């Protein structure tokens, strides 16, 4: 009898334990109050299995779902860009520029006007974008939860699992048995499964609430295949090089067709692109100075050279960069001028050289390139861009993003030591160049990465009063060394020939650029299978270096 009592007590204990194990005993709370990311009595949003901690990230406007610009840019894509001053929303990819204006029923897709059904709107100083536009361009569907308390954003391109509950259960805050309940769930309801933790699943309910349920409470999960999106690829070049880039920059100070019978041009051997310095910011309206001529292009093409004019900021007025790049209208004005001048002069591409970008203008610099690229590609122009060597102070140039919106990314592998340097040194040490190539390749594909090489050097004068320097072409630098009466020696650190002399109270130093240093640069280019070279600048070289430049593989 005693044994029966003991066994009965044990059996009852096991039942109680089993029931207790699967019965949540925590209190039930309102998830809109419990979770810090949510705000009560306002519109809340979840993105897949993430609660979005933004103020009013979505709302109904005129019976249509809208999402805030802040949510769209932060969670979906930073190719969504809003200009607060001009009330302009721009969305780009490598083929298209879509521009909409707040409240306007007409927009622009590349060069065409388009009708807009649901315009961009502003509510309580927050900019809202139609959810249909986000779905159309990014594959993100935005709906409302079944109880209309939470908006749900789902990425249609991602694979997920859908499951049906086989019994009543509770959605819990944590993957534990006895924890706070945030939503009671009934048999037959559906949940989206995101991950498994021990005996629990992290799921999203039909109301958009995210939490955990026991694995045992679902039927077999069914996979939902992600919808394949068409990969948007840039338009091919209308005039491809079909070769490595072999570019030389031609610095011009006036509007001239060039004297193509002079050694400056007749010495060119093997190059396939010439980049004259034609355009730069003229004023804060975005007007460009123009030193271009059609005759220059005609002469270049007679010599099988494509022409990619250089467009830069105004080096004497760097303050122009910010007001131009920060304005949607001014960025567009610059782009329109480049296209118009291409029609007038017949050039094949453009080379963008906007230097001295500051951290606060980094995003609008990227935006300028994102807007320029699809429009220039549509009219058949190649796009190249010049960027500094990687360094801590130039990290904000966002190389990876810029590399997506250009055909060629030219790293300016020179000015390692420049006019403002505190110490004398090489313009471009070979070890420094190789390290820069490696760092660039972490962000830029080799098929786009072009190595900038110098045709110049610097002669340095160290005095008790300080450091002086002046840039020299190859021949003038060698001629100066000859007057010193010293024999240059190989400097192992720079990989260049080095010479110095002491005169009175000054020490003169120079790291020479010549055929041997150019040979080493081309060897690096070939070793890393880069897309070619860009040389600064035409006329500073000696004729013998063209033999080495033709060794690009």
Image (spheres, grey):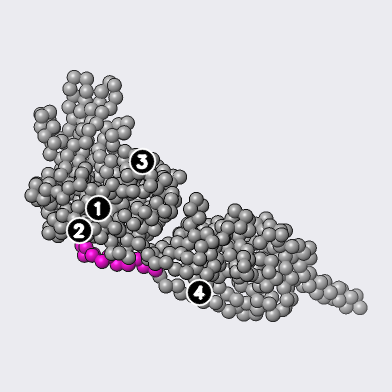
Between disc 1 and disc 3, whose residue precedes?
1
Residue 40 on the magenta span: no
Q: CA distance from mark 3 to mark 2?
A: 29 Å
Q: Which residues are magenta?
A: 232-244
Q: Secondary structure at mark 2?
A: strand
Nearer to us of marks 4 and 3 is: 3
Main secondary structure type of the part rendered in magenta: loop
Q: Is residue 352 above or below residue 221?
A: above
Tell me the crowding category of disc 2: few under 14, some 14 to 19, or many 20 or more residues within 10 angstroms, Cα based. many
Residue wearing tag 4: 226
Depth check: give the residue in front, 107 or 454: 107
Q: Is residue 380 above or below residue 258?
A: below
The answer to whether the residues at label 4 and label 2 have Cβ atoms under 8 Å apart is no
Residue at x-position 80% and y-position 74%:
15
Is 436 on the left or on the right of 517, as rendered?
A: right
Q: Secondary structure at mark 3?
A: helix
Give how far apart the Cα atoms at labels 1 and 3 are: 20 Å
- Residue 503 occupies quadrant: top left
Residue 507 relative to residue 321: left or right: left
- Mark 4 Cα within 10 Å, few/some/many (few <14, many 20+)? few
In the rendering, at what x and y percent does residue 321 appear?
A: 38, 45
Residue beneath disc 3: 318
Q: Are marks 2 and 1 in contact (CB under 8 Å)?
A: no
Q: Residue at x 55, y 77 (%)?
A: 223
Identify the residue position indicated by label 2 in the image. Answer: 306
x and y percent of residue 24 in the render?
Answer: 76, 67
- Asked if residue 211 shows in the view, the reply is yes
**For mark 1, what is the residue?**
309
Figure quadrant of the N terminus: bottom right
Determine the residue located farthest toward the right in the rendered image: 1
């Amino acid at each position: 009898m005693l044994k029966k009592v003991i066994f009965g007590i044990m059996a009852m204990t096991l039942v109680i334990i089993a029931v207790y194990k699967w019965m949540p005993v925590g209190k039930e709370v309102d998830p809109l109050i419990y979770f810090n990311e949510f705000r009560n009595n306002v519109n809340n949003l979840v993105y897949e299995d993430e609660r979005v901690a933004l103020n009013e990230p979505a709302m109904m406007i005129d019976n249509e779902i809208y999402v805030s610009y802040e949510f769209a840019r932060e969670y979906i894509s930073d190719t969504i860009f809003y200009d607060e001053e001009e009330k302009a929303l721009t969305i780009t990819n490598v083929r298209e520029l879509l521009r909409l204006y707040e409240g306007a029923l007409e927009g622009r897709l590349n060069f065409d006007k388009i009708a807009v059904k649901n315009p961009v709107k502003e509510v309580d100083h927050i900019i809202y974008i139609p959810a249909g536009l986000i779905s159309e361009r990014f594959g993100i569907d935005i709906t409302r939860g079944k109880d209309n308390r939470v908006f749900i954003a789902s990425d249609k391109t991602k694979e997920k699992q859908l499951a049906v509950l086989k019994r009543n259960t509770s959605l819990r805050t944590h993957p534990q048995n006895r924890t706070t309940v945030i939503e009671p769930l009934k048999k037959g309801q559906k949940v989206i499964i995101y991950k498994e933790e021990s005996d629990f699943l992290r799921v999203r309910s039909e109301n958009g609430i995210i939490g955990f349920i026991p694995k045992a409470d679902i039927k077999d999960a069914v996979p939902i295949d992600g919808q394949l999106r068409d990969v948007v690829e840039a338009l091919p070049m209308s005039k491809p090089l079909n070769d490595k880039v072999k570019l030389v920059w031609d610095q011009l100070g006036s509007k001239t067709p060039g004297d193509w019978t002079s050694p400056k041009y007749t010495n060119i051997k093997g190059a396939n692109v010439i980049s004259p310095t034609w355009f730069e910011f003229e004023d804060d309206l975005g007007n460009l100075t123009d030193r271009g001529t059609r005759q220059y292009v005609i002469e270049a093409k007679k010599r099988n050279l494509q022409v990619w004019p250089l467009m830069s900021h105004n080096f004497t007025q760097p303050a122009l960069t910010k007001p131009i790049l920060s304005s949607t209208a001014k960025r567009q004005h610059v782009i329109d001028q480049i296209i118009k001048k291409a029609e007038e002069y017949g050039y094949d591409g453009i080379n963008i050289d906007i230097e001295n970008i500051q951290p606060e203008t980094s995003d609008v610099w990227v935006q300028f390139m994102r807007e320029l690229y699809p429009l220039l590609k549509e009219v058949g122009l190649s796009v190249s861009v010049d960027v500094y060597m990687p360094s801590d102070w130039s990290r904000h140039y966002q190389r990876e993003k810029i590399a997506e919106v250009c055909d060629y990314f030219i790293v300016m592998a020179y000015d390692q030591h420049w006019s403002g340097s505190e110490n004398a040194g090489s313009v471009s040490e070979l070890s420094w160049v190789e390290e820069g190539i490696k760092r660039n390749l972490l962000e830029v594909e080799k098929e786009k990465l072009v190595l900038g090489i110098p045709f110049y050097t610097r002669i340095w004068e160290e005095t008790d009063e300080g450091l002086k320097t002046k840039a020299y072409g190859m021949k003038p630098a060698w001629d100066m060394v000859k007057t010193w009466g010293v024999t240059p020696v190989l400097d192992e650190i720079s990989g260049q020939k080095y010479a110095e002399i002491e005169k009175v109270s000054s020490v003169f130093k120079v790291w020479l650029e010549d055929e041997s240093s150019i040979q080493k640069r081309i060897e690096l280019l070939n070793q890393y299978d880069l897309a070619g070279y860009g040389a600064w600048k035409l006329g500073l070289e000696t004729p013998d270096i063209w033999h080495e430049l033709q060794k690009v593989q």
